[in-house]
Amino acid sequence: MPLIVVCFGISLLFLLILFFKLNAFISFIIVSLSIGILQGMDLNLIVSSIEKGIGNTLGFLVMILGLGAMLGKQVADSGAAQKITIGLVNTFGIKNTKWAVMTTGFIVGITMFYSVGFVILVPLVFTVAISTGIPLISIALPMLAALSVTHGYLPPHPAPSALAIMFNADIGKTLIYGFIIAIPVILISGPILTNFIKKVDAKPLKEFVSVKKFESNELPSMRISLITALMPVILIGFSTIIIELINEKNSSYEIIKFIGNPVIALLISVLYSIYSLGISQGKKMKEIMTTFSSSITGITMVLLIISGAGALKQILIDSGVSQYVGNLLQLSTISPLILGWLIATFIRFCVGSATVAGLTTAGIILPIVELGDVSPELMVLAIGSGSLMLSHVNDSGFWLFKEYFNLSVKDTLLTWTIMETSIGITGLIGVLILNSII
């Protein structure tokens, strides 16, 4: 019965999102209620379980996503993203422009939500392509591969952060493992892949080339731009490495661990950005705070969707479905990492949303992670890889790419979909290799 219930729940989720076009948050709540009722839970306990799932998921995540959104918006609105692009193109040279733009996508994408990074960086890609004469797709795909990978693999992005919390994974280790896997994945699915993709004549629509252009004297320095954009990664990464090397009784252990906490690292980075990309650039505090306020509006629905997934996860646990499914999955001879990847891939193909695919998979695969037979950090990355697979016409990212680059559906499938699938496959391979080493 529990297996039938979970299949019904996933099918209902597909139906509500795909056919009835219902908001994902509302869909998650309806599915959570349905599973609880079918499992015979007390009606009031179902509501309590949903409240618990939402609260446990958002308690830590809301701080990470809120501070991350503020920092990403500050990097964009201050011209730091544009400065990083210009600086890297000048450093790499015209012949290696796609590598420069790819690096920009990775650096800026770490703290900037995918849709924001897309809207900010794609017009810069248009400008670079026009000025260098390099085919647009060969510059765009490496940059978008970098943005996709950071979106799917690295905290403080919504899905990997939420997955890390659900699996009780160490966010610092997730970030480090994510970096190790992300670099070869981006190289393969970006600049290398573009050499094998059919020539596509992409022509940007004029109305989309609208990003604010800063004069050179308005831009922050390259050093300040890089330090500010990468500060969360630097603080979390170094803290994770150092606390692995020193004794817990060392007087500095707790301080280093405190600084490396994702919330504290992001708070320090945001406070630093107020000065480095704000006050020092002649901005008033009121203007900076307006930027921060506007950044939050972009994450409210993301938070609701994640909280809905948290409610579903809790219902699956409290109703006994997770334990039942977990016992069945334990009988499988397939690697748990591959299993998580396959489930995420299936849901991604059906629903379209990478975030929904990742978080729904987490609720199903959680019992296996809790047994301790698999690294929770690598499971975050395996599911993240699967959640990026096979993007097609039911994914908003597919249409964003198609319209901005003025492509046909066929050409979008031959470029965007192939790139996203390449990221998913090479990501899984990277996870399996890393799993055999650590």
Image (cartoon, rainbow, N blue to C red):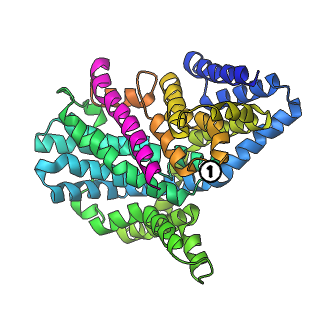
Label 1: element kind: helix
Residue behind mark 1: 165
Residue 14 % position (x, y): 59, 21
Residue lying furthest bottom: 251
Asked if residue 436 lies in the magenta stretch, the reply is yes
Q: Quadrant of residue 200?
A: top left
Q: Quadrant of residue 360?
A: top right
In the image, taking residue 418 as reference, residue 132 lies left or right, namely: left
Magenta residues, start to end: 409-438
Task: Report whether residue 221 is seen.
Answer: no
Residue 410 vs 245, above or below: the answer is above
Magenta: main secondary structure equals: helix
**Quadrant, the N terminus:** top right
Q: Quadrant of residue 257?
A: bottom right
The residue sitting at 60% across, 27% down in the picture is 23
The residue sitting at 65% across, 37% down in the picture is 363
In the image, taking residue 87 as reference, residue 288 lies left or right, namely: right
Task: Report whether residue 20 is seen.
Answer: yes
Asked if residue 216 lies in the magenta stretch, the reply is no
Residue 163 % position (x, y): 58, 45
